[in-house]
């Protein structure tokens, strides 16, 4: 549901290239009652200040429910959904992360600094399960599963898994 009111719609190619502007009046079909306290607590959402970063509590008030966060995985608790950034919490994971970044930098030599930052961020946020897909056939599912065992400290099982077919 959307609360009633006037809204400005802005469309652009980017945040610095705004091309279309329109004011829209919305009349909600659902009566949304907002308390004065909630309006006061969410005032920055209505008229944000420059460089304002919302707090978790303020966003939960706006969202209408508590936001749960998943704890960051640590060695022994890694899984196929763990990101490369999370893997850096272990020695082996950090070395593996550095190798991936180095490989990405070698593959894309003519990239400017801002683009390289985006590539690093992409590698950091990539889950372990995507290694097979992004390796051009160099890593099999079995290899990734073996790597996961190694990262979780199960060296013998990990090596056996990586060498099995």
Image (spheres, rainbow, N blue to C red):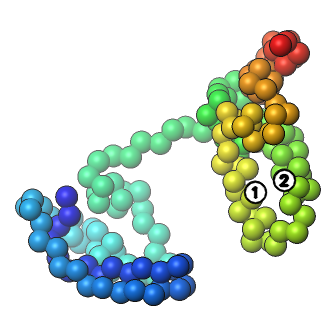
- Viewer-closest of 36 and 23: 23
Q: Vertically, is 34 above or below 25?
A: above
Mark 2 highlights which residue? 104
Determine which quarter of the picture holds residue 42: bottom left
Which x, y percent locates residue 165?
83, 13
Q: Is residue 2 left or right of residue 120?
A: left
Q: Is residue 24 left or right of residue 48?
A: left
- Viewer-closest of 133 and 127: 133
> Is there any visible trace of residue 92 in the rendered image?
no
Under circle 1, the secondary element is helix
Which x, y percent locates residue 124?
71, 49
Which x, y percent locates residue 29?
9, 62
Q: Which mark is residue 120?
A: 1
Q: Residue at x 61, y 34 (%)?
A: 81
Q: Is residue 128 left or right of residue 92?
A: left
For the N terminus, the image quarter is bottom left
Q: Residue at x 69, y 54 (%)?
A: 122
Q: Of discs 2 and 1, which sits in the foreground?
A: 2
Which x, y percent locates residue 65?
29, 48
Q: Are marks 2 and 1 in contact (CB under 8 Å)?
A: yes
Q: Residue at x 88, y 49 (%)?
A: 103
- Viewer-closest of 126 and 149: 126
| Mark toward the start of the polypeptide (2 vs 1) | 2
Q: Distance of mark 2 from mark 1, alpha carbons?
A: 8 Å
- Viewer-closest of 45 and 120: 120
């Amino acid at each position: 549901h959307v609360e009633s009111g006037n809204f400005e719609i802005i469309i652009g190619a980017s945040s610095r290239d705004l091309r279309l502007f329109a004011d829209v009046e919305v009349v909600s079909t659902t009566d949304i009652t907002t308390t004065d306290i909630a309006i006061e607590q969410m005032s920055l959402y209505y008229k944000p200040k420059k460089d304002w970063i919302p707090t978790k509590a303020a966003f939960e008030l706006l969202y209408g429910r508590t936001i749960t966060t998943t704890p960051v995985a640590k060695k022994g608790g890694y899984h196929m959904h763990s990101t490369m950034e999370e893997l850096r919490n272990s020695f082996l994971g950090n070395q593996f992360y550095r190798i991936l970044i180095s490989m990405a930098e070698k593959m894309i030599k003519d990239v400017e600094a801002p683009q390289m930052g985006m590539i690093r961020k992409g590698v950091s946020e990539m889950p372990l399960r995507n290694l097979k897909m992004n390796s051009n056939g160099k890593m099999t599912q079995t290899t990734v599963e073996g790597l996961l065992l190694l990262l979780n400290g199960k060296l013998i099982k990990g090596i056996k898994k990586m060498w099995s077919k």
